[in-house]
Image (cartoon, rainbow, N blue to C red):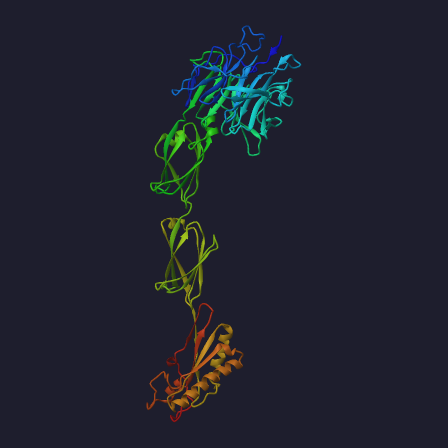
Amino acid sequence: MKNIKPLFLLFAFAMSLQLTAQQGVELKNIKEINTTQLDFSPIPFGNGVIFTTSKSNRFLQCPPQNAGDYTDLKFAEKKADGTFGKPVSLSGGVNGKYNDGSAAVNPAGNKMIFTRNNMEGKNAADVIDLKLYSADLEGDKWSNVTELPFNSDDWSTCHPALSKDGNLLVFSSNRPGSTENTMDLYWSKLESGVWSIPTNLGTGVNTGANEIFPFLDENNTLFFSSDRAGGTGGLDIWVAAMNGSGQWEMVGNLGAPFNQSGDDVNFVSLNGGTEGYIASDRGHKDAKGADDIYHWKYTPDIIDAIIVVVDKETNELLPEASVELTPTEYGNMLDKIYGGPVAQKSSLLTDRQGQITVQVRKGTKYAILTNKGDYKTDKREVAATEITAKSPYVIPLEKDKYFSKLIVEVVEDPSGKRIPLADIKILDKTTGKVVSLTGDGNGETTTQIDCDHVYEITASKNPYYSNTVTLKDFKLDCKDGEVRIKVPLKSPNIVMLEPVFFDFDKYYIRKRDAQPTLDNLVVLMNQYPSLQVRLGGNTDSRGTNKYNDRLSANRANSAKAYLIKKGIAKERIYTEQFGELKPINNCTDDVFCPETDHQLNRRTDVKAERHQEPGIDFKTRPVSEMKVQSDRKDKKRN
């Protein structure tokens, strides 16, 4: 007669090795609902679970040896103590003639999508395939059983899973386009109340093996069963997720203790991966039949850890250091999928004692990135066991930047005498920044420098030659907190400016000495083009003050005219007159003096007003040091 296709498809019944709880996972056989036959596909519903059960493990026999040996959907209420009440069959139209089971319920709890054998006929191979149907909950009965639009008599469509919002349906099918004609996973979206044309999840998930029994958790992480290569035997639980481009990608094998050498199906994850259900033929100590439903609970092994950040050289505690922990390798797949506050990236700052308190998960490796101001970044990867092996876990940071006080001394070369109030410029050759400072009365100035940088220090002070010294390779002194450097300035060249002497009561430029003196001044002013001079006219004490004032002005202007005639710009020459007010001796009114002493007062002094040439000190030669021959010997006029 008819060959009825089973709901499990290729389900094996080999017993597995005894499994004990490990990695914080506890498996508990739900003895109240399991039978000696097949019990699988648990789905949370209301205050309990809807699941699939049979009275026989012979899916391929038709007619069955005993009436009613096909699978039905049942509900069991979960009690306050965690146990379940007696299962009852779902009423209404969901339990039919053949196999009914493997269901999904929408978030509102009023619509179910479930699997059953094709009630309309069989395929070309004389097999009654599987189809998906929907039903509505009306009161306490499931009614309005309706085929989904993408079923076919020629292939199977089964094992529905609904997203949290009820708009995404994932199911298993061997329809055309499936990999090597095996069972693949497909998805469809509910658009305007109609399910879209199914799309294969792609080779990122599907293989040449069978992918069946999908389940979508609250984050749309996809759990499913597959007998593909790389498992532990039979059907294993695998995990996939949708990437940012909308493509499904594998996350990996769920691993022990969920997968074992037999068949593991119908993995259901609830409450952020902390509990759920699984159906399995494992050899659990409380196993009742070929396939039982288990409740699992995951309690991560969380350990408190103290991390301290210190200065590598001084062992000083470092407050406000940034410590960033990022899991790089997880102890199990649940940690990788759900993470949580101790399995995801966390960024903290050390307190005043330079420490943080953090929780880590046993079996997880962490990349630790530690930063602090002027310290080098510390990067390391360590296991949670290493972090907690000895408390506290110490992370030493090596100084990246050392700062020091720089003391600049400006001294005279070669005497070593301090030069006060010098102009000092400090060029940071590493950054290009220039700092301008002025030395104090003791010839010093102080600033802060980076020990890793190179500096050029330039000092200048008129009339000394400016000088630049380079500061480098000074880390040893720098780390001690103080660097002292001397900038020597060579003593200036002293250039004497000679006074111009005049005959008694005259202001012409006399040839024997005044002309050579002014000619020499012309040479100096051409040699030092920034030099400006001030010419101060003087007379001896003989004559009236008014007359002497006019005569001294004429003497200064006469010297200026001579310089201009020789090509010196008039803007470089200033004049002033002092009359008889500035004698260099005691030859004042009514004092008898020899003519040679009066001659020393008949002059025009030459003084440097200003100049920009470094290393030159213009001085006026003291008249008292000079011997000047007078033009006359009488004492009547000036």
Q: Which of the pair 41/20 is nearer the observer?
A: 41
Q: Position of residue 90 (x, y in %)?
A: 50, 17
Q: Which of the pair 186/133 is nearer the observer?
A: 133
Residue 524 appears in the picture as rendered: yes
Q: Position of residue 330 (x, y in %)?
A: 46, 28
- Most extreme residue toward the front, as rendered? 139
- Above or below residue 291? Residue 607 is below
How many numbered tags mark residues here? 0
- Most extreme residue toward the right, as rendered? 124
Q: Locate the N terminus and report the quarter of the image it occupies.
A: top right
Q: Position of residue 574 (x, y in %)?
A: 46, 79
Q: Which of the pair 598/555 is nearer the observer?
A: 555
Report the side of 379 relative to 244 (left or right): left
Report the side of 170 relative to 298 (left or right): right
Q: Locate the C terminus and report the quarter of the image it occupies.
A: bottom left
Q: Which of the pair 175/477 is nearer the observer?
A: 175
- Above or below residue 449? Residue 384 is above
